[in-house]
Image (cartoon, coloured by chain):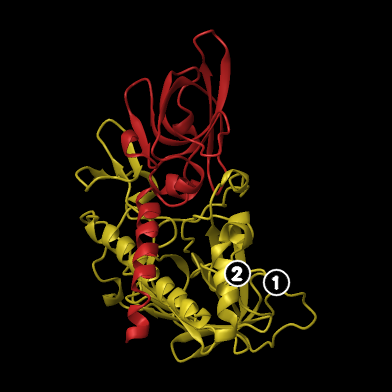
Chain colours: A red, B yellow
Amino acid sequence: MRHRLSCLPAVLAVLLVAASIAFAHHSVAGQFDTSKSVTLKGSIAKVEWINPHIYVYLDVKDADGTVATWALETLPTRMMRQAGLSKESVIGSPGELITVVAVPARDGTKHLAWISKITYADGRFYALGGNANGQ
Amino acid sequence: MTHRFLNCFVVTVAVVFAASYAMVSDIHAQAPVPAGTRDANPASKPTPHLADGRPDLNGTWEHGRGFAFGRAQTLPDGSVCVLGCPEATAAPARGNAAGGRGGAAAPAAPAAPNFPKYKPEFLPKVKDLSDRQVQTDTVLQCQPPGVPRIGPPAKIVQNAHEVVFLYDDVNGSFFRIVPTDGRPHRKGLPPSYLGDAIGHWEGDTLVVETLNFNEDTWLIDNGAFHTKDLKIVERLRRVGDAIEYQATAQDPAVLVEPWTRAQALRLSDHELEESARCEDRDLEHVIDGSHHDNPR
């Protein structure tokens, strides 16, 4: 009994870590800094409908007019499919102004982030997890 | 000291499993079931049989696991909350969700934490693989997940001679062919991710025995490795519009005892689709060992 109780601190510690990861939507926290968010405005250049994570490429114009293409990662295709979303519904209309709240990469890679929320010109949005600020 | 630490590791893994199951179960338990789209008790329906008298396993089957951690919600303006949704106040998501695989409350998850029991001398290996899962788990590298980690079949095609299991896994579309006409295991095949299966009927239960696995897969998450001598015995029993699915892993060289995983399936009206290409681009950017569970 005493032997098992000696595990308690380790169990509690791991549970706390696991819970924090789970509430941060799992491995998102291993790659993206869920304590930060960035808001991007631009047009979708391309969507790669692949697993384990879909990629949305967003062309974002800086203040000086330079266009940077962000690689924005999101959920697996099946989760999107189950939610009734398709590649076409994510792409939106050509040239449509899209607003994305995203969680930046922890390793400092520029223009790489996880989509927390994507909002289209007509106001509809898709909340995709990762950061409470985006939902 | 080492022994105590390893015991702690096993206890910790078990507790985390329990917490994970509770969390997922709780999410699903809170999700409302759309009226008229679900049978409260699919097992209460009559069990159909084929002309040969065997229970009819044909169909698409959902088991409410995988990556469906929450339930999507659709708002009137077409907005969709896919993940991290608040308590449901809106209509269930459109598309496949209504009455399909992801949009309704899942069948109950296993009631207890469940992890294979390894012989003490193999616990360090399990711990090491688990600690380094981001590097060591081939599932995270888009490889086939193996059996039973791949989970129950998503679709079953059955005739009098064979049963075919189909899977639309996040890592790809997979199949397993299960002869049920008395053929023995094939000889000379290279070891594979999904092994070589044969089946037979024990009353109303289809029993599938699978051998000849490679050693690249795990039984389940968190370092649950196996040897090439792994044998998996799956049992499928249709009850109404439900299937009681059970998979038992036998690998006496490393396991203290056979390990069993049970899941409840229910008939679905959702047709499978070809899985999207799997191409991992994350691992080079992951900066610590944290990872999500990879249930099926």
Residue B141, position in %: x, y? 63, 55
Left or right placement of residue B97 versus residue B59 in this view: left
Residue B189, position in %: x, y? 77, 77
Residue that numbered label 1 is attached to: B192
Q: Which residue is depicted at the point 43% across and 44% down?
A: A80
Residue A120, position in %: x, y? 38, 24
| SS for callout 2 | loop
Q: Are marks 2 and 1 in contact (CB under 8 Å)?
A: no
Count of labels in the image = 2
Q: Which residue is depicted at the point 53% across and 41% down?
A: A54
- In this picture, is B81 found above or below B51? above
Picture disc at residue B245: none
Say whether residue B265 is visible.
Answer: no
- Asked whether the residues under marks 2 and 1 belong to the same chain, the reply is yes
Q: Which residue is depicted at the point 45% across and 18% down?
A: A96
Furthest residue to the front? B1
Q: Which quarter of the figure has residue B132?
A: bottom right
Residue A29, position in %: x, y? 45, 46
Dot 2 or dot 1, earlier in sequence:
2
Residue at mark 2 to residue at mark 1: CA–CA distance = 8 Å
**What chain is tagged by disc 1?**
B
- In this picture, is B97 found above or below B200? above
The foreground one among B252 and B87 is B252
The foreground one among B25 and B52 is B25
Furthest residue to the top? A64
Q: Which quarter of the figure has residue B130?
A: bottom right
Q: Amino acid at mark 1?
A: Ser
- In this picture, is B20 found above or below A121? below
Say whether residue A105 is visible.
Answer: yes
Q: Amino acid at mark 2?
A: Gly
Furthest residue to the bottom? B203
Residue that numbered label 2 is attached to: B146
